[in-house]
Every structure is written in C-alpha cells, then in structure tokens.
Image (cartoon, rainbow, N blue to C red):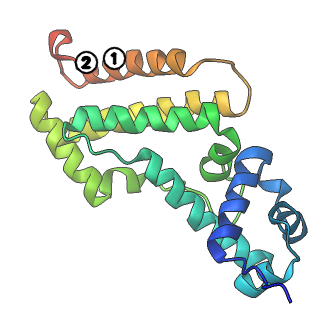
Amino acid sequence: MARKVRISKDIILQSALNMLIRDGYSSINIKTLAKEIGCSTQPIVWHFDNMEGLRVALWEYAISYAKSKLDTNVSNAVEAFEHTGRAYVDMAVNEPNLFRFLYLGENKRHSINSFGAITTNKNNAEQIRKIAEYLGIPEENVSRYLQNTIIYAHGVATLVATNVIAASEEEMMAMINRAADGFLMQEGVPAEKLPQ
C-alpha cells in the first residue's frame, strides 16, 4: 500500500499565494486550490475548516511575504526608506495581483489602510528620528516628508498595478525620487543636502 502524502499547511498557503500572485485573489477557492496542489479538498478543509479560515490564513501569509520583501538591513535610515519604497514599487510592477490584494482592498475583510500606523509604528518612529538627525530637521518635518512621499508613491504604484499607466520600475522610482526631493525641500532641506 502506497504511503499517503501529507499536505501541510505551508504547502497549501504557498500554493494559494502562488495562485494569488499569478491569477489574482478571485481565482482562489477550495476546489481551485486543491486542483493547483493536486489533492482533494480534504486537506484544505482539515487545516482551515472553510474558505473564511483559508482567507484569514492567506492574508497573514501574504503580509509576511510582503514584509520580507520590504524589510532591509540597511543601517542608513534614508537608504532604508528608499529600499522599502523600491520594494513597494517592485511589487506593484511585478506582482500587481498581490499589490491589489494587500493595498487596494481587494480582500474586503482585510486591508492595509491605517495611515497613522506608518508614523506611529515603533520601528518607523526610530527611522524618523534617524532621518531627522541625518537631515538636521525636526521629526515633525520628517513625518510630513514621509507621509507625502508614501502617498505619492502609493498613487503611482496604484496607477501601475491597475494598468492605468504603463511605467517601468526605473521610471516610477525617478518620479518618486523627484517628488521626494521636492517634499524634502518643502520641509527646509537645502538642495545641496538632498540624498543622492
């Protein structure tokens, strides 16, 4: 008798994430996911009970995946902010289905839409402090600069992820960098002190 292959929770979630990235959130249900994995629906129901349980777990799994792409080991706070922005733009260009799922409310039950969390998050507060120190401006000015840059970057990324405009990652980053420079100058940073 052949030994049964056990379908783990991680296999199911990774397959669901692959489907989400490739085909979009609406393509995922228990039957299509089982077909993707090559198993019956039983392991999915056993691990997640129902579609709602799978949705919640997929949301958490997708967030973890996105955070791993956005995290950086760069110690310079300005470079770390730019790395995060570049990874965000990369997701909009190369994984638009994931971008829409996480940031545009495609999953009605979950979305990342708490703007206040950006500046009150403990790690972000430390980054704001370091950027303020580096640029020689108050933390309040840095918070406004980050908010404006994030709003602008999100707008550009959204336009690309929803196929309203076509732009390469390099073009998007150039637009965002020009806007960020303008936002810094509004906050009192002289042109010669702008990050290169």
As drawn, 137 above or below 98: above
Is residue 74 or residue 156 the one in the foreground? Answer: 74
Q: Are marks 1 and 2 in contact (CB under 8 Å)?
A: yes
Is residue 176 shown left or right of residue 42?
Answer: left
Is residue 82 or residue 21 the one in the foreground? Answer: 21
* Residue for badge 1: 182
> Where residue 195 sits: x, y (%)?
23, 20
Residue pictured at 83% horizontal, 60% vertical: 36
As drawn, 37 above or below 131: below
Which secondary structure lies at badge 1? helix
> Where residue 80 sits: x, y (%)?
29, 38
Which secondary structure lies at badge 2? helix
Find the residue positioned furthest to the front. 1
**Three-letter amino acid code at the position of disc 1:** Gly
Q: Quadrant of residue 62?
A: bottom right
Are there few (<14), some (14-19), or many (20+) residues within 10 Å of tag 1? some
Residue 65 bears which disc, if any? none
Find the residue positioned furthest to the top. 192
* Residue for badge 2: 185
**Three-letter amino acid code at the position of disc 2:** Met
